[in-house]
Image (spheres, rainbow, N blue to C red):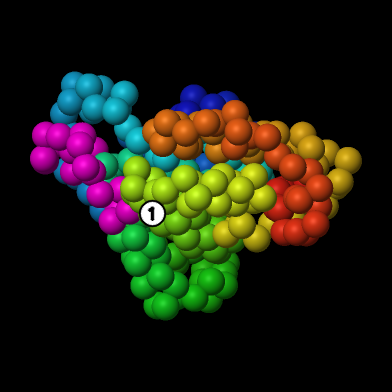
């Protein structure tokens, strides 16, 4: 969310305390990557511009089609992963064989350490979680971490998978078009097909680097999805 967009709504926030709350919740700008401790180790802007076209599709900034707290958690994860990738590539001067799974696993480990130290809900309404975010956002960061570890692992293995295993992975993608790690449920069946279509489009972008048949992944078998009862999405 851009600073200009944030400024446009701040005029209606009169209380200084309330203003700070809005600022803390909404400010997830790239230039202030508040979720990572490397903000002082700035990279050369020209180098960043050169590297960004090579950013893995898994770390796309496109928001998933779901509730905004889940989106904020996704943004927080992606900011950290993109920064890890940029620093690694700048240091090694190569975009080949970048350990995406290691980045994802490392951030998951850090989040789990934070969860062990300050469990979800323990700091509710205290404003003491560092970096600050709502407890619900932190909870979904942990779930997104599981998603990224799984997806990165699959991407790492994909070139060496046989046809049968690739077919199984594609079946799982059709069965769970919405990441099962999020554990959220479609409540409004009238819009279920539309929601699944949005998630399939999002998944297609995330998996572009695999060079697989994206059209096949986006063909969802509605009967299979109904039978599982596990397909998830945020419904108004």
Q: What residue is shown at x 42% (from left), y 48% (from top)?
A: 162
Which residue was labeled with disc 1?
153
Magenta span: 86-103
Residue name at image x 70 percent, y 39 percent: 220
Q: As rendered, which of 77 and 28 lies closer to the eye?
A: 77
Quarter of the figure that contains the C terminus: top right
192 is higher (above) or lower (below) than 5: below
Q: Is residue 8 left or right of residue 156?
A: right
Q: Position of residue 98 (x, y in %)?
A: 23, 43
Residue at the image point whose x is 59% and y is 37% from the top: 217
The extreme front residue here reads: 163
Asked if 221 appears above or below 182 in the picture, the reply is above
36 versus 199 height, above or below: below
Residue 97: say if magenta. yes
Helix, strand or loop for the magenta stretch, by majority = helix
Q: Is residue 233 magenta?
A: no
Residue nearer the viewer, 165 or 157: 165
Residue at far left of view: 92
Q: Considering the numbered disc 1 on the image, is that residue within a helix, a strand or a loop?
A: helix
Residue at image point 65% right, 60% down: 183
Taking 105 as reference, is 212 above or below it?
above
Left or right of 136? Residue 147 is left
Horizontal and vertical percent for residue 148? 44, 52
> Residue placed farthest to the right in the image?
190
Percent of width and height locating residue 101:
33, 53
113 or 105: nearer the viewer: 105
Q: Is residue 63 visible?
A: yes
């Amino acid at each position: 969310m851009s600073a200009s967009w944030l400024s446009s709504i701040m005029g209606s926030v009169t209380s200084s305390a309330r203003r700070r709350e809005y600022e803390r919740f909404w400010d997830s700008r790239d230039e202030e990557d508040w979720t990572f401790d490397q903000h002082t180790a700035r990279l050369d802007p020209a180098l960043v511009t050169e590297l960004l076209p090579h950013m893995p599709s898994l770390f796309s900034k496109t928001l998933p089609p779901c509730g905004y707290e889940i989106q904020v958690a996704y943004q927080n994860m992606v900011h950290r992963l993109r920064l890890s990738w940029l620093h690694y590539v700048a240091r090694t001067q190569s975009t080949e064989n970048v350990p995406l799974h290691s980045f994802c696993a490392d951030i998951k480990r850090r989040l789990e350490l934070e969860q062990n130290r300050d469990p979800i809900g323990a700091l509710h309404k205290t404003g003491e979680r560092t970096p600050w975010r709502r407890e619900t956002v932190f909870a979904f960061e942990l779930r997104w971490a599981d998603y990224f570890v799984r997806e990165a692992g699959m991407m790492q293995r994909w070139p060496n998978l046989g046809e049968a295993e690739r077919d199984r992975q594609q079946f799982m993608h059709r069965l769970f078009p919405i990441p099962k790690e999020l554990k959220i449920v479609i409540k409004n069946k009238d819009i279920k097909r539309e929601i699944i279509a949005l998630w399939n489009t999002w998944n297609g972008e995330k998996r572009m680097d695999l060079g697989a048949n994206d059209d096949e992944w986006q063909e969802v078998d509605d009967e299979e999805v109904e039978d599982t009862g596990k397909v998830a999405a945020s419904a108004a």
